[in-house]
Amino acid sequence: MSIIIRIIVNAIALWAAVFLIQGINVTAGTASEQILVYLAVGAIFGVVNAVIKPIVKTVGCAFYVLTLGLIALVVNALLLMLTAWAAEQIGLAFTIDGFWPAFWGAIVVAVVSWLLSLFLPDGGERD
């Protein structure tokens, strides 16, 4: 169940990035197609963050220390661009027009995801 919630949170965060940042686009026609694109891209984004981000953090540990963590902004932008590339490869209507839209979009996605996670119950709590 938590995977589905994470995908929905990612989809909402990506929607916010598309809404706020010029250069990040979803070109699907109908509302239902757009929702499916957001959910699919949210799933891809989750996989990219779960698989590639820990590897990049481990390999680039010195850069994180040297830049006091600011390199994470660049890494997140590149991971968002990788997500857009993967989405394009499987035929999803999600595009990013360059590094700077990805940079600002990654910040929006991170902030919106964090805000949404404040309202979600912790995975460790059980009734």
Image (cartoon, helix red, strand yellow):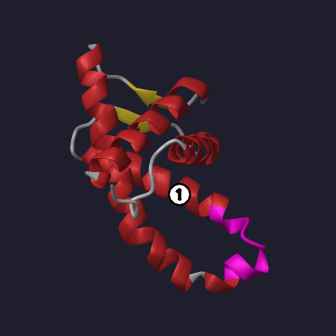
Q: Position of residue 109 (x, y in %)?
A: 55, 43
Residue 63 appears anywhere in the view: yes
Q: Residue at x 45, y 56 (%)?
A: 122
Q: Mark 1 sits on what residue? A: 78
Q: Position of residue 68 (x, y in %)?
A: 78, 73
Q: Nearer the viewer, residue 82 or 35?
A: 35
Q: Main secondary structure of the magenta part?
A: helix
Figure disc tally: 1
- In the image, residue 80 above or below residue 50: above
Q: Position of residue 96 (x, y in %)?
A: 48, 39
- Tag 1's secondary structure? helix
Span colored in magenta: 63-72
Q: Amino acid at mark 1?
A: Leu
Magenta-span inclusion, residue 41: no
Q: Residue at x 25, y 30 (%)?
A: 36
Residue 86 appears anywhere in the view: no
In the image, taking residue 79 as reference, residue 103 lies left or right, namely right
Q: Nearer the viewer, residue 47 or 82?
A: 47
Q: Nearer the viewer, residue 45 or 9?
A: 9
Q: Residue at x 77, y 73 (%)?
A: 67
The picture quadrant where one finds residue 30 is top left
In the image, taking residue 60 as reference, residue 13 lies left or right, namely left
Q: Position of residue 74 (x, y in %)?
A: 63, 60
